[in-house]
Image: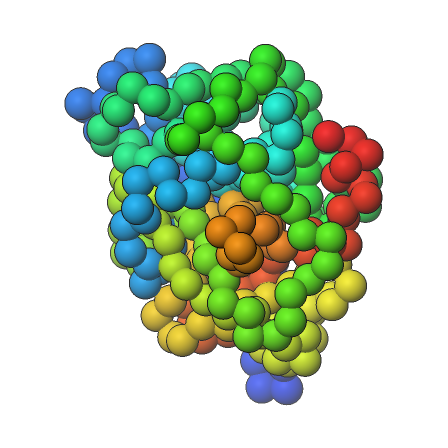
Amino acid sequence: MKALIIALALFGCAFANVLRSEPVEIRPNIMTYRNAHYQDRIIGGTNDVPHAHPYQISLQTTSSTGVWYHTCGGSIIGDDTVLTAAHCVDSKPASEYRVVSAEYDFNNIEGVETTIYVKELIIHPDWNAAAINNDVALIKIQGVFKYDSNVAKVTLASSTPPDKTVSIVTGWGYTNYESKTRPNILQAITTERCSDFKAWWGTLFNYKSKSQVATYTTRGEGICIGDSGGPLVYESKSTFIQYGVCSYVMTPCASGNPDVYARVSAFYDWINNNK
């Protein structure tokens, strides 16, 4: 986990936390071929309806001992392409990542899950880790996704919805920042898009409205470590439309400050040209 100082206030400082995960001990009853650690959760969320968001994937990587674990979320945007955050994949080669589609409960194998290894990582050329800006990347898998009721593409937003748009974010992030409580079931939370001004003020002037979008939730709710790369969506005519990629929060998580996402519409052309 990395904590980055992003701004100094008059009477103190605040930290922006990219939402990286770290290995945790695997539960013994997870089958060896899955061998993926359960990690983290959205704070204040609830168990998602099984496979209600079939575009959601678990991005997994290996620990120093060669054990696979969940590190970030992502969304299926093409037959062989996943959209995620750049900071999720900027530290290891493609050979050390894999994607699991139709994942729901890390502690229960339903038989619909598919593990696919990664062929290529395409990180946005302007990704700036110090500023946590342009935090998007594409994952090309070895093979293609097989679509069914549990696996589907998400629609990408070519424009950002207006303020107060009711939205949904899903992931396996911490449920409690201090105790680092971790679930095994995919979590979901309903939130709202907040105005660019509120986001700018709430992140101590670090927010960049051209490339980022934010949501505002009450204290005790929001994204946290392990949710990175996951999709922020709204629903229109029974279609989920992704307009954000989970990027960072002001620490501690769920403190009442805005949660920040890469703005999909800002990278719409780049995504489509590279997917």
Is 38 on the left-hand or right-hand side of 83?
left
Depth order, front residue of 198/18: 198
Q: How many marks?
A: 0
Depth order, front residue of 195/87: 195
To which quarter of the image does residue 78 belong?
top right
Q: Residue furthest front?
A: 237
The residue at the point 29 percent across, 32 percent down is 106
Residue 206: x and y in percent read: 69, 69
Residue 58: x and y in percent read: 45, 33
Give above or below for 61 relative to 192: above
The reply to whether residue 72 is in sight is: no
Is 266 on the left-hand or right-hand side of 26?
right
Depth order, front residue of 169/28: 169
To which quarter of the image does residue 142 belong?
top right
The residue at the point 68 percent across, 27 percent down is 121
To which quarter of the image does residue 137 belong?
top right
